[in-house]
Image (cartoon, rainbow, N blue to C red):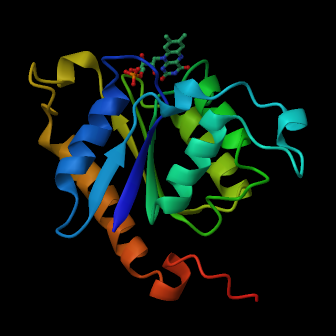
Amino acid sequence: MQVLGICGSLRKGSTNLLVLEEAARMMPHGSTLTYDAEQVGRLPPFNPDLDQDGRVPPPAVAAWREALRAADAVLVSSPEYAHGVPGALKNALDWIVSSGELIEKPTALVVAGPGGGRFAREGLRRVLEVIGSRVVADATLVLGRSQITPDRRFVDPELAAELRRAVEALAAAARAVPDIERSGVDLRR
Ligand SMILES: Cc1cc2nc3c(=O)[nH]c(=O)nc-3n(C[C@H](O)[C@H](O)[C@H](O)COP(=O)(O)O)c2cc1C
């Protein structure tokens, strides 16, 4: 089972990147979580003119779509900015509105930051659902820099437990997807 981690923060010392690191360590046997911390930041601003039928998408967009297509499930971890979804992450999701890589894909949504992030969580859930993703778990982690150890682990075991619940729910939902669907065979043919 292959899970793709998606980070909504472009910051090098991002706490949301730490969430992905912790989640990768929590994956059940036989499942792995991988992520490219810079993928979302490499995407150009969404422009529908570059995304019309018959046009070749920019290479970073093609790579983003391929990474999503190849994943059995995704885990999005994002901060809240200005009571909303970070622009870079929203931009990345705009690029897949019409290509549909997240349709029916089991998805876990984590919002981590010192103030939690209720607005980002609500906003992200709305966007993920409208693009067809199946949000099977979500969690808000109230996580400030003082709650991270120097070797980048959570100080609070309750935060780790909450993340573990989301990771396990995601892995279980991904495992429940029938193999025929996971193989990408188009059943409508
Ligand atoms: C410009 C800016 C706006 C922010 N707005 C909010 C906000 O509206 N709500 C909130 O809870 N945190 C807000 N934060 C705090 C971030 O969520 C926090 O810094 C978070 O740790 C950033 O995530 P990262 O560590 O993964 O980069 C804001 C931070 C910045 C820099």
Q: Is residue 167 above or below residue 10?
A: below
Q: Residue at x 38, y 64 (%)?
A: 170
Q: Is residue 146 above or below residue 152?
A: above
Q: Quadrant of residue 167?
A: bottom left
- Image location of residue 128, percent across then percent down: 64, 52
- Image location of residue 185, percent across then percent down: 61, 82
Q: Residue at x 30, y 38 (%)?
A: 19
Position of the C terminus, as image quadrant, is bottom right
Q: Residue at x 71, y 55 (%)?
A: 131
- The mark total stands at 0
Q: Quadrant of residue 188?
A: bottom right
Residue 162 at least partly seen: no
Position of the N terminus, as image quadrant, is bottom left
Q: Is residue 189 left or right of residue 174?
A: right
- Image location of residue 12, percent across then percent down: 35, 17
Q: Is residue 107 above or below residue 180?
A: above
Q: Residue at x 30, y 17 (%)?
A: 13
Q: Quadrant of residue 72?
A: bottom left
- Image location of residue 53, percent across then percent down: 89, 52
Q: Is residue 119 above or below residue 110?
A: above
Please tell me which residue lies in front, 151 or 169: 151
Q: Is residue 70 left or right of residue 93?
A: left
Q: Is residue 22 left or right of residue 41?
A: left
Residue 134 at least partly seen: yes
